[in-house]
Amino acid sequence: MIYVVGLGNPGIAYKKTRHNVGAMILEELRDVFAFPEFQIKKTTQALVSEGLIAEHEAVLVFPQTFMNLSGTAVAKICKYMKPDDMLVVIYDDLDVPVGKLKLSYEKSAGGHNGVASVIEHLGSKAFIRIRIGISPTDENGKVISTDTPLKTNNQNWMTDPSSVYTGVIVLEDMNFKGKAVIHFTEDNSAGIDNPD
């Protein structure tokens, strides 16, 4: 079983902000793979939907705590996990340019409060992260400073969700334990690089 957690803030005010890209990806996954509607699971403080991603059993999880308290809900979800289950956390990353995402495992929170909360409540860094790029770049592809991710941005910053679910499936197949960068093209094809 793959538990896919999308970090974000609940409520209409945050729905389309870059900080909520994790939750947006969950919505895309639900639509693409025809998962049922999200249902509140009160014992976990999260919206949950169960289904299949390319024949892999999966649970989509959107914590209904605010971002900085995400670990509360994730820790409750993890009580249902079996030893062979996989936890994947999807969230925004200001250090990654729009159009790219990075995979990492057992790393620090990197200044992301939601991830810091997950690490704190789990007492472990041993989970997979899919870090979605939300920052614009200059003509040389270098990330430029931008406004707070809690505000909307006119740039079309939304990362192609097909790359994310490709990444989730590949993680299952390769028993991912390192880091990688997923590159994708307009035709929705994706490739994974494993940097040194």
Image (spheres, grey):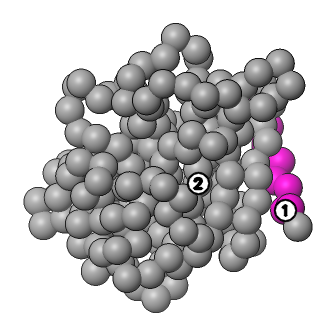
Where residue 164 sits: x, y (%)? 61, 46
Q: Secondary structure at mark 1?
A: loop
Displayed quadrant of residue 14 = top left
Highlighted range, magenta = 188-195
Q: Residue furthest front?
A: 145
The amino acid on which the numbered mark 1 sits, given as a three-letter code, is Asn
Displayed quadrant of residue 145 = top right
121 or 144: nearer the viewer: 144
- Asked whether disc 1 touches disc 2, contact meaning CB atoms under 8 Å apart, the reply is no
Q: Residue at x 48, y 69 (%)?
A: 87
Left-right relation of 147 to 101: left
Q: Residue at x 57, y 40 (%)?
A: 94
Counting the numbered discs, the total is: 2
Where residue 60 sits: x, y (%)? 39, 54
Q: Which mark is residue 18?
A: none
Q: Which residue is mark 1?
A: 194
The amino acid on which the numbered mark 2 sits, given as a three-letter code, is Ile
Q: Could you classify mark 1 by the number of other residues whose Cα lies within 10 Å: few (under 14), some (14-19), or many (20 or more)?
A: few
Where residue 29 sits: x, y (%)? 49, 42
Q: Could you classify mark 2 by the number of other residues whose Cα lies within 10 Å: few (under 14), some (14-19), or many (20 or more)?
A: many
Displayed quadrant of residue 10 = top left
Where residue 20 sits: x, y (%)? 39, 37
Q: CA distance from mark 1 to mark 2?
A: 14 Å
Tell me if residue 147 comes above or below residue 89 in the rendering. Answer: above
Q: Which mark is residue 130?
A: 2
Q: Residue at x 24, y 72 (%)?
A: 76
Precedes in sequence: disc 1 or disc 2: 2
Left-right relation of 81 to 65: right
